[in-house]
Image: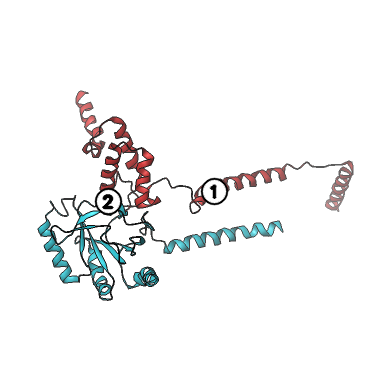
Chain colours: A red, B cyan
Amino acid sequence: MKWFLLTLSLFVSMGAFAEQDRYQFDNNKQAILFEELTKELRCPKCQNQNIADSDAVVAKDLRDKVLVLVKEGKSKDEVIDYMIDRFGYFVHYDPPVTPATLVLWVLPVLIVIVGFGFIVIRQRKASVKQTWSSDDEMLLAKLIEQNKRQEQS
Amino acid sequence: MNRKILALAPLLVFAFVCVFLYQGLFANPREIQTGRLGQEMPAFNLPDLMQDNKEWTNESLKGEVYLLNVWGTWCPTCLVELGYLTKLREQGVKIIGLYYVQGYDADFDGPFNMQSLRTEVTDMLQRAGDPYQFNILDLHRTLSLDLGVSGAPETFLVDKNGTILLHHTGDINPRVWRAKFAPIMQELK
């Protein structure tokens, strides 16, 4: 059992992420901020990776810069603004609401509203109250009678 | 009437998707613009690549329209565009090189050596053409970072007052020059 657990622990520890170890921080808060920022900032070269994952030279430069800024005591927004000043909105995975990106926010809401609107309207149409008078009853009886006669003849 | 509109809806959706996808055909995700567009060249003070004790600053570049071309000998696309850039120089376009050192990866360069870099650069420019008035060495890529450079080649068009008018990622060829640079150059004349 002991050997089994030991072997198992070998496999578990294989997923450890060693990248962070190379960076030295003054306190834990800085380390957490650094990790958040490098996950949220997008690599301008390897465009579908954040700068924590990317091996591009520019991603390394950005990581180093984030480290310096974080150690200087800059807040999260200040670091993000610093990067946006240089690389444009592209560099942040959370784009701001601008006329060009408005459609990203509006379209899903619009689709949901239109979809529910459609369902509600259909339901209302289906649940319209039926009117049934004694005249209708008589007409129905007559039609059934007619039908019977036709079948017999 | 209502039904007719409803019947047209799929067609409208289809048309919308067509337009959306069609423009996607011509969109280039690599074409990202620096946040510095329309702003002044960021302040810097960097050494010349070829001469000792020579330094360049954002102030010393002012006064003339120029192209700032980010390049490196490690970059194959830069090699390709050197020929056309040299032609542009012959037509009177002022081109300044910003040498982007791909330094941190041992697989690429090993430790930095100024002498071997100069030899390499001279070699390549002799073979492929030399479009540069001079080259600025950005050893730690500080100016590149301030300019929002993501790699090489990239080119900035800067006017007399030091304002960045254009940022192009990728090589410059006759087509790119005609479409993007020539109209602005014409205006500046």
Q: Secondary structure at mark 2?
A: helix
Q: Is residue B55 left or right of residue A72?
A: left
Q: Which residue is mark 2?
A: A58
Q: Are marks 1 and 2 on the same chain?
A: yes
Look at the image and tell me in which quarter the C terminus of chain B lies: bottom left
Within 10 Å of the Cα at label 2, are there few (<14), some (14-19), or many (20+) other Cα atoms? many
- The kind of residue on which mark 1 rests is Val
Label ID, residue A32: none
Look at the image and tell me in which quarter the N terminus of chain B lies: bottom right
Image quarter of residue B160: bottom left
Subunit bearing disc 1 = A
User: Which residue in the rendered view is the most extreme toward the left?
Assistant: B115
Whole-percent x, y for residue A18 in the image: 23, 38
User: Which residue in the rendered view is the most extreme toward the top?
Assistant: A2
Q: Which residue is mark 1?
A: A106
Asked whether the beta carbons under mark 1 and mark 2 sit within 8 Å of each other, the answer is: no
- The kind of residue on which mark 2 rests is Val
Whole-percent x, y for residue B112 in the image: 13, 53
Tell me what residue is drawn at x 29 percent, y 71 percent: B93
Mark yes or no: residue B101 visible.
no
In the image, residue B62 sits, relative to residue A83, either above or below, namely below
Tell me what residue is drawn at x 69 percent, y 57 percent: B3
